[in-house]
Amino acid sequence: MALARDQERAQKAPPPRRPWLGIVGFGLLGGVLITAMRALEYRFLILEHSVEIYAGLVAVVFASVGVWLGGRYTRPRERLVVREVPVEVPATPEFVRDETNLARVGLTPRELGILELIAAGLSTREIAARVCLSENTVKTHTSRVFEKLEARRRVQAVQRARQLRLIP
């Protein structure tokens, strides 16, 4: 029976009090009211002195634009000075094609012309336009040049042709 009475009292007992909750609530409410009053005060300040505020903003904008324009138009300009300097180029001996290597490799005149254009750095499309052939024909000539010079790439073909003195 005593146990039942204790349970009834525990159920009817008020919840524990939290005094700090009320203090924090009143503090927050006071902060909100003070902030609202300050905002109204600034609002009236702006309404009373609006002309001065706008004049100050316009002055700041014009001053910054003036400083920017002044810096842009008064900075010294860079001048490019070009001087021609004579350079002596040593005379290169005339290139003489090694006809024996040309006959040994077996390049046709058309293939030799394609090889010279490859050495000049032209692409397949540029070579085709220059010699009035289709791109496929140029590719065929290029692959035959590679076979005859035993090369896998353009650079290897040009190196091999220069070693054999087929092209300058």
Image (cartoon, rainbow, N blue to C red):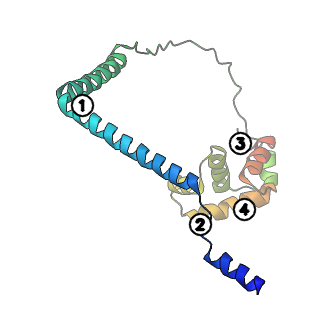
Residue 28 location in percent, x, y?
Answer: 46, 48
Q: Which amino acid does label 4 sit on?
A: Arg
Dot in front, 3 or 1: 1
Q: In this view, does 86 lie above or below 60?
A: above
Between 107 and 56, the residue placed more toward the observer is 56
In the structure shown, which secondary structural element does the residue marked by tag 3 occupy? loop
Between 21 and 123, the residue placed more toward the observer is 21
Q: How far apart are marks 2 and 4 (CA)?
A: 12 Å
Q: Which amino acid does label 1 sit on?
A: Leu
Count neighbours of disc 2 (C-alpha within 10 A) and say few if under 14, some if 14 to 19, many if 20 or more. Answer: few
Quadrant containing the N terminus in the rendered view:
bottom right
Q: Mark number for residue 45?
A: 1
Q: Mark 2 points at which residue?
A: 136
Count neighbours of disc 4 (C-alpha within 10 A) and say few if under 14, some if 14 to 19, many if 20 or more. Answer: some
Q: Distance between the residues labelled 4 and 1?
A: 91 Å
Mark 2 or mark 1: name the one nearer the start of the chain: 1
Q: How far apart are marks 2 and 1 (CA)?
A: 84 Å
Dot in front, 3 or 2: 2
Q: Name the residue under label 3.
A: 167
Dot in front, 2 or 4: 2
Q: How far apart are marks 3 and 1 (CA)?
A: 89 Å
Q: What residue type is labelled 3?
A: Ile
Circles 2 and 1 in contact, beta carbons < 8 Å: no
Q: How far apart are marks 3 and 2 (CA)?
A: 23 Å
The furthest residue to the front: 1
In the structure shown, which secondary structural element does the residue marked by tag 4 occupy? helix
Q: Mark 4 points at which residue?
A: 144
Q: Distance between the residues labelled 3 and 4?
A: 17 Å
State the residue at coordinates (37%, 40%): 34
State the residue at coordinates (21%, 29%): 54
State the residue at coordinates (70%, 38%): 168
